[in-house]
Amino acid sequence: MSQNPSLDQVTLSAAGKTVELPVQHGTLGNPCIDIARLPKETGCFTYDPGFGATASCKSAITFIDGDKGVLLYRGYPIEQLAAHSNFLEVAYLLMHGELPSKDGFAKFEDRVTHHTMMHEAFKSFIGGFRHDAHPMSMLVGMLGSMASFYHNTLDLEDPEQRRMAAIRLIAKVPTIAAACYRHSIGWPLRYPRNNLEYVERFLHMMFEVPAGPLELKPVAARALDLLFILHADHEQNASTSTVRLVGSTGANPYACVAAGVAALWGPAHGGANEAVLRMLAEIGDAKHVQSAVDRAKDKESGFRLMGFGHRVYKNFDPRATIIREMTHKVLDELGVDDPMLEVAMRLEEAALKDEYFVQRKLYPNVDFYSGIIYKALGIPTEMFTVMFAIARTAGWVSHWLEQQEDPEFRIGRPRQIYTGAAARDYPAK
């Protein structure tokens, strides 16, 4: 294959045929060879397990440079948004492409707040789950059921109705998530207190009991809001690609997001911060940290340090740089005394100093720190991925909205290399 820079195309020879393919460039990032004509002109498809080298769409929402540790939402560095914005403003930015005016944000916040309530029928629906059902399984079912509540008020050809579906999801996912948690521990469901802001309202729905008001230290809401910002979107990851793939069929947006939640549940994706806590529990005591580090360096041990390194970032995860400072602030201000958190801090210190991890750029990532903050806030391990889902809903609906307006919008249809039996006849009896 050769590239002609003057024509901005490549020449590829395949199956005895030569074809010139255009090269497409985005605002930032690697150029992409447009292979749409390849099957027709050569009879060949391309093979890319996991789509790691394939652009499945054009998107203006999020950009990642893993080598440089860069994450941009609509062009804004994640560091600036984390320092100056809040989650709802970031959700608006992802959905609309620009930061809101003061009046625009007030209207957006009011619309989200207006739609925080669940339909009363949800109480019966959630009551059908076993008491020990995983909250993520309940969240998948509950979000899928939203399609039955709003199926006759959604015209996918109407931009305003599409936006309303997105707002409903951003508004109701925290309410549903809190209800899933309270059902799992046998507590009565709490209605949203709409005089509170988004994150504080969610924490009250999670932890407030009828017997008395909930008193929260401000750092709790600040920390959770920061986590929601950092998790709001991350380009074409597995769950976002799932939302887009389901959305490409014209499916109801609530079903699309439910599919995204199901994809997020996997331990290789959103469940990674749960794995961090399990690893910390396995280490058990701060005095065992060095032996754990030594085991991790031994390829024969089978032991891995969870929450270190990242498939995309080959440098320090920019989200981890931000959240690290907040992690220490949360532990200090809440006065948390938890042996597992001491293990985490010692492990972080040991790995950042160990040449083995430094050379391989196996730095603590966002999953390492987020699990520590969630635990310090009293959020149980089985709810960690649910927290991720609340935040990522903003990204999912933004990608779904973008997809609906894409002039190249078409149903997703990956190809395969068939390795089964060749054509054969059914044996005579």
Image (spheres, rainbow, N blue to C red):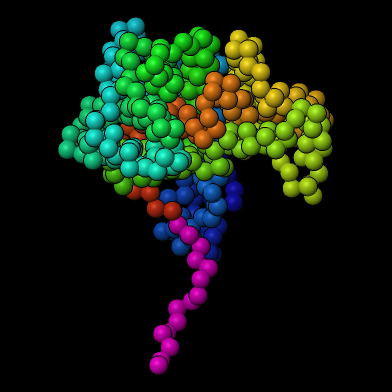
Q: Over which residues does the magenta segment extend?
A: 415-429
The residue that appears at 70% across and 38% down in the rendered structure is 282
The image shows residue 344, relative to residue 325, as above or below, that is below
Tell me if residue 230 can be seen: no
Judged from this view, the residue extending furthest toward the left is 152
- 413 relative to 291, above or below: below
What residue is rendered at 40% in x and 13% in y? 212
Q: Position of residue 412 (x, y in %)?
A: 38, 49
Residue 3: in magenta span: no
* Residue 7 placement, left or right of 355: left
State the residue in front, 90 or 142: 142
Looking at the rendering, which quadrant does residue 188 occupy?
top left
Horizontally, residue 243 falls left or right of residue 161, namely right
Q: In this image, 386 relative to 297: left or right?
A: left
Q: Residue 360 placed where, x, y %?
A: 75, 35
Quarter of image, res 125 = top left
Identity of the residue drawn at 78% across and 31% down = 289
- Report the side of 36 relative to 191 (left or right): right
The reply to whether residue 336 is in sight is yes
- The image quadrant that residue 176 belongs to is top left
In the displayed image of the protein, which residue is found farthest to the front?
211
